[in-house]
Image (cartoon, helix red, strand yellow):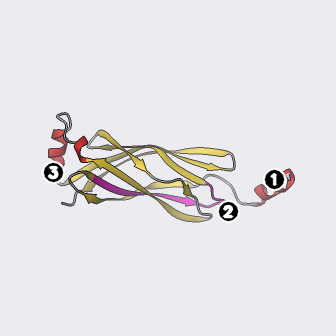
Amino acid sequence: MFSLTFTLLFNCSFTKKPEFVRLEDFEVIDSNSKNITIRAEALFLNKNDVGGTLKTDDLKVYINELELASVVSEEFDVPKREKFTIPLTIKVETDSFTNNKNLGSLLGSLISQSLKVHIKGNIKYKIMGYSSTYSVDEIQDVKIKF
């Protein structure tokens, strides 16, 4: 059994973990009196013959420099030998903007009709007992739709 597993592992192309390219396509997909929902995508390139999984639990979201949310995403199965994206959903409760400390930030966003979204943290990659992390630290201005 061990030799079969060993043979399968080394006959497959597994040279390195998939490459994290960037975060892209930030977009406010819903804004109402209770929540603002933002969608983004994490772009990867996997040149290997094996997949694995990615998990985004360690990503924090800063809106206008205030930590207000985390990324919500299921564990994602990595496809073999292709470019792929992981959908990331960010749900921010609007009442988190409305305390006295954050009110200036909210007013600035309403005037400019955009939010400064900063996603920071780690995405974890796992395959057959091997694990690694990708460090993410990206900022983008996102237009608010009223």
Dot placed on the residue nearer the N-terminal end, 1 or 2: 1
| Residue furthest out toward the top | 101
Residue 73 located left or right of residue 46: left
Q: Within the magenta stretch, is there residue 47?
A: yes
Q: Where is residue 103 in the image (x, y as percent from the top left)?
A: 16, 39
Give the amino acid at mark 3.
Leu
Dot placed on the residue nearer the N-terminal end, 2 or 3: 2
The residue wearing badge 1 is 6
Q: Where is residue 60 in the image (x, y as percent from the top left)?
A: 40, 42
Q: In the picture, residue 37 is in which quadrant?
A: bottom left
Q: Mark 1 Cα within 10 Å, few/some/many (few <14, many 20+)?
A: few
Q: Residue at x 27, y 48 (%)?
A: 116
Foreground residue among 14 and 38: 38
Residue 111 located left or right of residue 53: left
- Cβ–Cβ below 8 Å for labels 1 and 3? no
Q: In the picture, residue 78 is in which quadrant?
A: bottom right
- Cβ–Cβ below 8 Å for labels 2 and 3? no
The residue wearing badge 2 is 49
Label 3 sits on a secondary structure element that is helix
Foreground residue among 67 and 132: 67
Specify the label residue 110 is tagged with: 3
Give the amino acid at mark 1.
Phe
Cα separation, mark 1 vs mark 3, equals: 58 Å
Marks 2, 3: nearer the viewer: 3
